[in-house]
Amino acid sequence: MSMQKRLSELEFSESGTVRDILASRHELNCLGVRAGKHLTMITRQPIKGPVVVAVDDMEVAMGLETARCVIVEVDRP
Amino acid sequence: MMGNPNVGKSALFNRLTGANAVVSNYPGTTVDVTRGFLRKERLEYEIIDVPGAYSLEARDAAEEVAVRILGGHPDAVVMVVLDATRVERGLYLALEVMEHGNPLFVALNMIDAAREREVSVDVATLQEILGVPVVPTSAVLGEGMLDLVEAVHRAQPPDIAAIEARAFGEVKCPAGERPLSIAGTAGGVPE
C-alpha cells in the first residue's frame, strides 16, 4: 500500500515520487519538480521556513505553502 | 545568449566579447542587459547576454525582459547555454525557446565541472534529438570557444515535432549499435 504525503510533511532524508502539484505548478516545473520526479527531503525549517528538496542532484527551495501543495508518494523504507 | 541563471552565461559572454561590452538597463526596468561584439575573420557578431530565465512564461522582471528581447529580435540566432551538470533542468527553457522558432544552437557549458563530478553527457545523442549543433564548452577554461563561434553558422530553426518524435521514439546510438529508447515525461538525457 503506497503512502502519500504533502511535501511539507516529509521527514528529513525521506524520499518519494511527485504525484501531483496543486499550486505553483509552472514555477516548480521549470525548476525540475514535476509529476513523476523522484525527490528527497533535505531540510524543512520549522515555523514557515523554506523547504529544500534534492531533485536530480539539484537542490530546490520553496516556501512552506508551496510545499503543502505538492503531493508525494513516499518510498517504502 | 539565453539560459538559466548560473550556467556560466556571463562568463561565456565575457570570453566571446572581451572588454568591449556595454551594460545598460532594459528600458523601463532595473534589469541589466549586456551587449558586446565579437570580431572574427572579418565578421562582426553582436552578442546580447539575455538575463537568466527558467522559463519564457515570465515569473519575474528578469524573465519578462528575456521574453521581450527574444521577441524583439526575430532574426537573431539564439545560443542556448546549458549547464552540463544540469542538462535536464536547462532543457525546459531550451525547448520553450525552440518553440519560438529562431535558428538556434546549444552551448553545453561548465563541461569542466561535469568532468570533475564525473557527469557525462551524450552530446551526440542530444544533438541528434534536438537537431541543432551542441558544443561542449568551458568558459572558465576557454575550451570550445572556436567551435562555438563556428556553430553560429550551423544554427538551425528547430523542428519541435521532429524533436518530440525522436525523443519519444527510438534513436540509434551514434555508433550504429542497438537502438536506444528515451523514457517519457521525467526522462532526461541518457548518460
Image: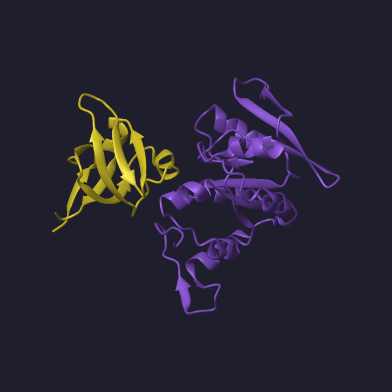
Left or right side of B76 for B60: left
Judge whether B74 appears above or below B95 on screen.
above
User: Is residue B1 something one can see in this rendering?
Assistant: yes
Q: Residue furthest front?
A: B141
Instruction: Point out residue B59 in the picture as x, y percentages from the top left corner.
Output: 49, 32
Judge whether A25 appears above or below A50 on screen.
below
Q: How is the image coloured?
A: by chain
Residue B118 sits in quarter: bottom left
Report the front residue among B48 and A71.
Answer: B48
Instruction: Point out residue B69 in the picture as x, y percentages from the top left corner.
Output: 67, 35
Report the front residue among B137 and A17.
Answer: B137
Q: Residue furthest right?
A: B42
Left or right side of B17 for A68: left
Q: Residue at x 48, y 67 (%)?
A: B168
* Rendered shade, chain A: yellow
User: Is residue B88 something one can see in this rendering?
Assistant: no
Q: Residue at x 56, y 29 (%)?
A: B62
Q: How many marks?
A: 0
Q: Residue at x 76, y 45 (%)?
A: B75
Residue B182 sits in quarter: bottom left
Instruction: Point out residue B89 in the picture as x, y percentages from the top left corner.
Output: 46, 47
Report the front residue among B9 and A64.
Answer: B9
Q: Residue at x 34, y 47 (%)?
A: A55
Image quadrant holding the C terminus of chain A, namely bottom left
Give the chain coloured purple. B
Instruction: Point out residue A35 in the picture as x, y percentages from the top left corner.
Output: 35, 51
Image quadrant holding the N terminus of chain A, namely bottom left
Report the front residue among B41 and A56.
Answer: B41
